[in-house]
Amino acid sequence: MLMSGEQYIESMKKYDPRIFLGGKQVKLLENPTTMTVVKANATVYDLALKPEYEAVMTVQSPFTGEKVSRNLHIAMSNADLEKRAEMALLTSQVLGTCNYRCVGADILNALAGITWEMDRDLGTGYHKRFIEHLKYLQQNDLACSGAVTDPKGDRSKRPAQQEDPDVYVHVKEKRADGIVVRGAKVSQSGAIGAHETIVIPTMGMKAGEEDFAVAFAVPNGAEGITYICQYTPFTAERELNDPRYLGNPQYGQRETCIMVFDDVFVPWERVFMCGETRYCGKLIARFAKTHRMNCGGACKVGFADIIIGATQLMAEYSGVQKAPHIVDKITDMIRISETARACSIAAALKGREEPEGSGFYQPDDVFGNAAKLTVAEGFWDIMKWAGDIGGGMAVTMPSEKELENPETGDYVRKFMKASAPAELRLRMAKVIQNWCAGLHGAGTWHGAGSPMAQKMALYNLANLEEKKALAKKIAGLPE
Ligand SMILES: Cc1cc2nc3c(=O)[nH]c(=O)nc-3n(C[C@H](O)[C@H](O)[C@H](O)COP(=O)(O)OP(=O)(O)OC[C@H]3O[C@@H](n4cnc5c(N)ncnc54)[C@H](O)[C@@H]3O)c2cc1C
């Protein structure tokens, strides 16, 4: 049964996660910043119930036979992959922040294939277990966040060589009824507001690193879990200000946290990998493929649509919209964003069944990496032009509260007016400030993996031998 936004909020009352923000313990459903995550999730639940978005946001599950959220669906065709990318685009356009279920959705897809493969090769029972858990998630329409990124300590060392092994999530103890895990995951988007978090290793593991080769699901606020939230100038601003005057009043910034696992017990029925190091690399590679298409490509296109809209409006509000250089810059923003969108759709349409015989589909790797890289580089340019066209006021403007101040209101109205009233210019400049002078540059760069990882993947995937042969043929050189 699909939940409404209101039912989702009601369902979160059953959980009592241990959350810290700005040095204080806070309640998920009471704090203005943690509530931005809850509101974003609630809106995604409501989108799934709107007839106009039904085809994008929902799908008939082959496992339960019922209509389920696409956030919990395993892609079984190219059309499924395309719809998944469309969902990322749509939710970004609507929220102007993270669809906090995106990483979870892509992990579920990677786990479906890898558990199938492990059962086939090793005779394990992971896939059956995974599908049972998936059915539980689908039947209850639960929100899942996805935990990949370990703190990693000294990046030049392997997990087992670290001074403190806890910088990688690992199995501390195996019991008859389950495992005990220890460690942490960082930069966890929306984990505080998810019913469940699905955890996988951050990278490929080698023989001798079996304890780190672990994948599992935990319910929100399970014993031993602490969430330590990011705290930014935007958090402080939300605490101090009337939310109406913030750049994204409802949904705010992409809220993440450090999720600490301090000896958390996970029953076996929630464990989907435990020690199979040989399968870790493939698991993370499949996750990356899907996530680069969705989070890397499509999601940021939705953000770009908002930035382009705000920039065009700012141009109109200041009366410069017809100047050739403005038209040229807006066109450049559209070019970057549509190229990323095209790569993302190409990744879906050129995707294929993986592993063969499983029925599960993965996007094309080359196009997925190209989508993420185009966006990582291009987003800075998009923000550059938004900052250019928005003018200095995007970072120098006074608070909109001045408009209500009898001592300054008339001055602000008089001097901030251009071809549109001060109220409109201030409001839209704040939207631009939210993107250009905010967290989104570095966020887009690192989200779905730092670009060096995609560059290495793209270089390795490109068939350079074939390209060399083509060049030799044209030059009249022997093969
Ligand atoms: C807004 C946002 C939301 C996110 N949401 C999630 C989420 O929901 N779930 C999740 O699991 N993760 C999430 N992430 C984490 C994201 O996947 C990581 O930020 C990304 O993989 C980079 O890892 P890192 O932050 O530890 O960077 P670092 O590893 O510290 O990278 C910093 C630099 O070091 C380089 N580097 C790192 N290791 C090596 C090495 N061994 N050799 C050479 N160079 C190296 C990198 O290329 C980069 O240039 C999110 C990140 C952001 C910014």
Image (cartoon, rainbow, N blue to C red):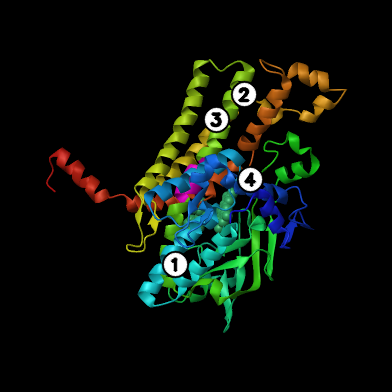
Instruction: Read off the residue under disc 3.
Output: 308
Q: Position of residue 322 (x, y in %)?
A: 53, 15
Is any atom of residue 151 visible in this view? no
Q: Which residue is mark 1?
A: 280
Tell which circle, 3 or 4, labels the residue nearer the N-terminal end.
Answer: 4
Residue at numbered disc 4: 43
Percent from the top left, x then y, of residue 444? Answer: 54, 44
Q: Label 1 amino acid? A: Cys
Between disc 2 and disc 3, whose residue precedes? 3
* Amino acid of disc 2: Met
Task: Tell whether label 1 touches label 4 (CB within 8 Å).
Answer: no
Mark 4 residue CB less than 8 A from any atom of ligand 1: no
Of labels 4 and 1, the one closer to you: 4
Q: Residues within 10 Å of mark 1 (few under 14, many from 20)?
A: many
Decide if residue 444 is on the left or right side of residue 342.
Answer: right
Circle 2 sits in a helix, a strand or a loop, which is it? helix
Closer to the chain start, of discs 1 and 2, is 1
The relative height of residue 85 versus residue 149 in the rendered view (above or below) is: above
Q: Residues within 10 Å of mark 2 (few under 14, many from 20)?
A: many
Q: Which residue is mark 2?
A: 314
Stretch of the chain drawn in magenta:
292-300
Q: Main secondary structure of the magenta part?
A: helix
